[in-house]
Amino acid sequence: MARRRQIYEGKAKILYEGPEPGTLIQYFKDDATAFNAQKKGTISGKGVLNNRISEHVFTLLGNIGVPTHFLRRLNMREQLIRQVEIVPIEVVVRNVAAGSMSKRLGIEEGTQLPRTIIEYCLKDDALGDPLVTEEHILCFGWAAQEELHDIADLAIRVNDFLSGLFAGIGIRLVDFKLEFGRIWDNDYSRIILADEISPDNCRLWDMATGEKLDKDRFRRDLGGEVEAYQEVARRLGLLPEDADSAVLDLETHRKRRGK
C-alpha cells in the first residue's frame, strides 16, 4: 500500500492527502499542548475519544443544517473531511467567564455572562494567538465582511445547539473554540465549520459539581484527563460504561497492523 502524503501536522491532528480530490484524512493524536505549546504532554487514548466525540457532534450539527467539513469517520483515529482553505481566525464563543477572559478582565471564573460573547484571535502560535477585532480582520483581509457575518451566525447556531445538547447530559458549556474554512466553486466561496469539537477545545463543567471535564485538567495539572474525556463520551452515549481508552487504543493498534 502506498504511503499517504502528509499535508500538515498541528498540535493535536495530522492531515493526510485524501482518496479523492478535495478530501483529506484527519488523524487525531494523543499529544496534548497548552499555553501555545509551552506545555506539552500526552493523554493516552485522547485521539480515539476526540475522533468519536467530534464525529458525533459534527453529524448532529449537519443534521440541523450547519455546513461542516466532516464526511465520515474512517476508523478509531481518522475521519474523512472536505479540504478547505482555513480562515486564519480562531472564534471563541463564551457563555461563562473563564480562562483568559477572567484574567484579562478580572471577572471571577464561573460568572455567567449577561449575554454570549464572540471573540476573535489570530491563528499564530508565535504571536500567542492574539485577540483581534473585526476591524483588524477586515483591514488585513483575513476575512470579508460577508464571511464574518456568516461566521458569527454559524457560531451562535452552534452555541445554541451545543448548550442544549450538553445541558441535557448535565454538562455546562462554558466556552469553546471554533475554526472555519472556505470551500470554492469556481470563483465563489462559502464558509463552513472545520477542525473539531471535543473536550480539547471546549470548556465543559459538570452542572452538579463544577468538575472540569476538558483539557483544563491538563492545563492546570489536575490529573484525570482521560477519565474526564471518557465521561463526556459516556454521557453522549458513545462509550460503554465498562470501556476505557486503553481498550480503545489497543483496538486502534490492532486495526493498524491489519491494514
Image (cartoon, rainbow, N blue to C red):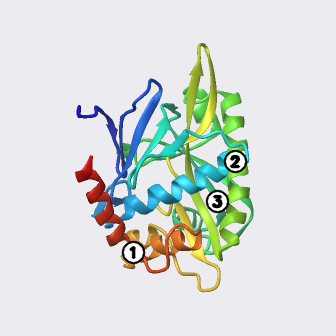
Marks 1/2: CA–CA distance: 29 Å
Between 32 and 129, the one nearer to me in the picture? 32
Residue 203 position in % (x across, y down): 55, 66
Between 254 and 64, the one nearer to me in the picture? 254
Tag 2 or tag 3, which sits nearer the N-term? 2
Residue 136 position in % (x across, y down): 58, 35
Residue 148 position in % (x across, y down): 67, 35
Residue under the image location 65 percent in, 68 percent down: 166
Residue 197 seen from this side: no
Tag 3 or tag 1, which sits nearer the N-term? 3
Residue 190 position in % (x across, y down): 64, 28
- Position of 85 with respect to 117 (left or right) is left
- Position of 251 with respect to 73 (left or right) is left
User: Where residue 244 is drawn, which disc sits there?
Assistant: 1
Asked which secondary structure carries label 1, the reply is loop
Residue for badge 3:
94
Residue under the image location 53 percent in, 73 percent down: 234
The three-letter code of the residue at mark 3 reads Arg
User: Where residue 63 is drawn, which disc sits there?
Assistant: 2
- Residue lying at the far front of the rendered structure: 258
The three-letter code of the residue at mark 2 reads Asn
Tag 2 or tag 1, which sits nearer the N-term? 2
Asked if the residues shown at circle 3 and circle 2 are in contact, with their CB atoms under 8 angstroms apart, the answer is no
Between 53 and 104, the one nearer to me in the picture? 53
- Residue lying at the far top of the rendered structure: 186
Residue under the image location 54 percent in, 40 percent down: 71
- Residue lying at the far bottom of the rendered structure: 209
Count of numbered circles in the view: 3
The three-letter code of the residue at mark 1 reads Asp
- Residue lying at the far right of the rendered structure: 114
Residue 108 seen from this side: yes
Asked which secondary structure carries label 2, the reply is helix
